[in-house]
Amino acid sequence: MDLLKDLLAALSGVLNGLPQGILALTFGFASVPTALAFVAGAAGNALTGSVAVISFQAETITVAGTMGRNMRERLSMIFFGAAIMFIIGMFGLLEKIIDWIGPVITNGMMAGVGIMLARVAWDMAKNDRLVGIISFITGFFTYMITKDLVYTITVSVVLSSIVSYFFNKNKPLEQKIEVTEKLIRQKFVINPYVIRGALAMVCLNIGANIAFGQINGDIADTHVNVDILTMISSLADMVSTFFGGGPVEAIISATSSAPHAVWSGVLMMALMAIILFSGLLPKIGRFIPTASIAGFLFVLGAIVTVPPNATAALTAGDGSSGLVGGTTMVVTAITDPFLGMLAGIIMKAAISIFGL
């Protein structure tokens, strides 16, 4: 049974990543080179025993895809941003940041990310109502019955995708996405747009790695060294963009709740690499609508992540700690984890200077 759950969790992670993979292809990132990122991630986790996996992340794909005016700029900002992040991880700065900001701000960030997940899930469901409703209902009741995230994402994604297939099979297919099947060495460029984009990627990933790494660790009931996570994801990004592939970052994954979380995550990344190497991503992605993961994201955000972390952020220590945690949580929810962390630090400093 444990091995079955490991496999289901890995497959669920694949299902979660495919819609974001299609998004990466629409911005022009190549398919086969991105497989190298998943190979790097699988090898890194196998060697270090990290439970936090890397995969397609809609936020970084969108930031890079919209800030870069062409593919050369997009690849350059991802590569240089990843190089900066690797140095940050190599010197252990993220773990030091966690120790410095304290548990109140960290819990506030995690609660804010939970709210973000619930909001994203709601927006997905609104854009594809039938699939979204099925995913919400099946995800909610599966989790309430099993209390297991592996079964939650598996049941909700599979059933909502089946419903989508039968209701949309007579609709014309979307325009075919061309997939690059070659590894082509890219030439990078440095200009103000690339510098700005690279720094934006760094800021986004500092907060995301801390928050996502901690959430995965909580789910797996183990410590996640976010500096190791940062180095693995940075190497993956650099090897991917070096040949024209897209960004692959830390995500919140159901594999963290598998009985053997490390090897379930390694299997998930290996499967993603196989799919990308074989050029199957656009073909498989047609049958898995983005809204199919809405139910899982809502359960993960609203039920699993927000309640314990919001409670810890708002009730730890005295009343001033609640202000710091609440500020961090709200700003994270409406912007991103990095700005949420900065807001919490500023509020903490302001209270120490001016008093409550």
Image (tube, rainbow, N blue to C red):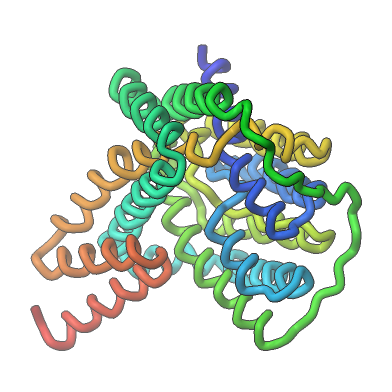
Residue 200: quarter of image: bottom right
Coordinates of residue 259 in the picture (x, y in percent): 49, 24
**247 shown above or below 220:** below
Q: How many labels does the image show?
A: 0
Q: Nearer the viewer, residue 160 or 86?
A: 160
Q: Which of 87 and 295 is in front in this view?
A: 295
Coordinates of residue 244 in the picture (x, y in percent): 81, 60
Q: Can residue 232 be seen in this view?
A: no
Coordinates of residue 220 in the picture (x, y in percent): 44, 36
Q: Residue at x 29, y 43 (%)?
A: 302
Q: Which of 75 and 81 is in front in this view?
A: 75
Q: Relative to residue 239, is residue 289 drawn left or right?
A: left
**87 shown above or below 260:** below
Coordinates of residue 91 in the picture (x, y in percent): 59, 69
Q: Which residue is drawn at 38% across and 67% down?
A: 335
Residue 269: quarter of image: top right
**Image quadrant for the C terminus?**
bottom left
**63 shown above or below 275:** below
Q: Relative to residue 266, is residue 36 drawn left or right?
A: right
